[in-house]
Image (cartoon, helix red, strand yellow):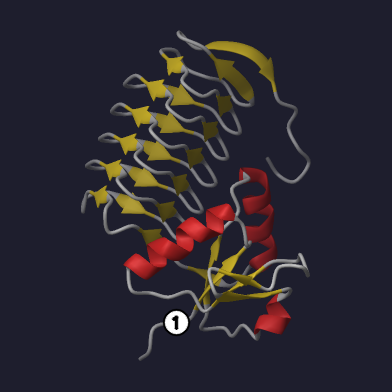
């Protein structure tokens, strides 16, 4: 049986990186979908404006190539019941005893150590380190050069900024934001925005109405 066609949803800089991950895996994307009519190609791949224009079939798979966690969740809900692919760069090191769920993208030089669980539509960005027994829930984004020690939990939709560090055993809530370079030594509640070393809460984000 031939491999399913892979479409990326969103034609952005983030999509460029995912295209190259798929190329490195020898799984060329068939095309991209973006509602901006001025975008007709990306890295020489065709960009369609709608799913209908792309003539998607039930056998095709998607990766949502959008950096915003909130928008990624909305698109995932809109696209159901399609199937989703996972893109793992060959230069990433992912333990065979860990789980990476569908729709997730694992970029170059990422490390995922033993018995970690990575949810659906997660972004593990370049050079981040996920140590043993971590749990990253759906739609989270772990930015470049983030370091999570062992037994860290990151809630749904949370963004951990570039270069942040999280000590072992920390629980970070849902839809929280951890600032670039922050050092997290205490648990973080849902919707909190945390910055600095040591990390401190500066405000709370208002929960949105679309299920977050």
Dot 1, crowdedness within 10 Å: few (<14), some or many (≥20)? some
Query: How many circles with numbers are drawn on the protein?
Result: 1
Residue 19: image x %, image y %?
47, 65
On the picture, is 105 further left or further right than 90? right
Quick one: 134 or 179, which is closer to the camera? 179
On the picture, is 47 further left or further right than 159? right
Identified at 62% across, 52% down, the residue is 72
Residue 76: image x %, image y %?
62, 59
Let me know if residue 29 appears in the view: yes
- The residue sitting at the front extreme is 44
Identified at 75% across, 66% down, the residue is 35
Identified at 73% across, 75% down, the residue is 50
Identify the residue under disc 1: 4
* Vertical side of 106 occupied by 165: above or below: above
Residue 133: image x %, image y %?
28, 36
* SS label for mark 1: loop
């Amino acid at each position: 049986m031939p491999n399913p066609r892979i479409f990326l949803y969103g034609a952005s800089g983030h999509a460029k990186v995912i295209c190259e991950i798929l190329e490195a895996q020898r799984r060329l994307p068939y095309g991209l979908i973006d509602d901006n009519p001025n975008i007709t190609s990306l890295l020489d791949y065709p960009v369609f404006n709608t799913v209908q224009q792309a003539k998607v079939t039930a056998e095709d798979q998607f990766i949502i190539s959008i950096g915003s966690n909130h928008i990624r969740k909305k698109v995932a809900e809109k696209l159901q019941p399609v199937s989703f692919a996972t893109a793992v760069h060959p230069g990433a090191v992912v333990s065979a005893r860990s789980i990476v769920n569908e729709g997730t993208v694992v970029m170059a030089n990422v490390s995922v150590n033993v018995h970690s669980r990575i949810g659906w539509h997660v972004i593990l960005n370049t050079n981040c380190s996920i140590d043993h027994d971590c749990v990253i829930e759906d739609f989270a984004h772990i930015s470049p050069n983030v370091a999570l020690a062992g037994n860290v939990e990151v809630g749904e939709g949370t963004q951990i900024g570039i270069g942040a560090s999280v000590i072992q055993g920390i629980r970070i809530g849902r839809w929280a934001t951890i600032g670039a370079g922050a050092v997290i030594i205490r648990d973080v509640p849902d919707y909190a925005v945390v910055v600095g070393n040591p990390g401190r809460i500066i405000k709370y984000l208002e929960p949105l109405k679309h299920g977050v």
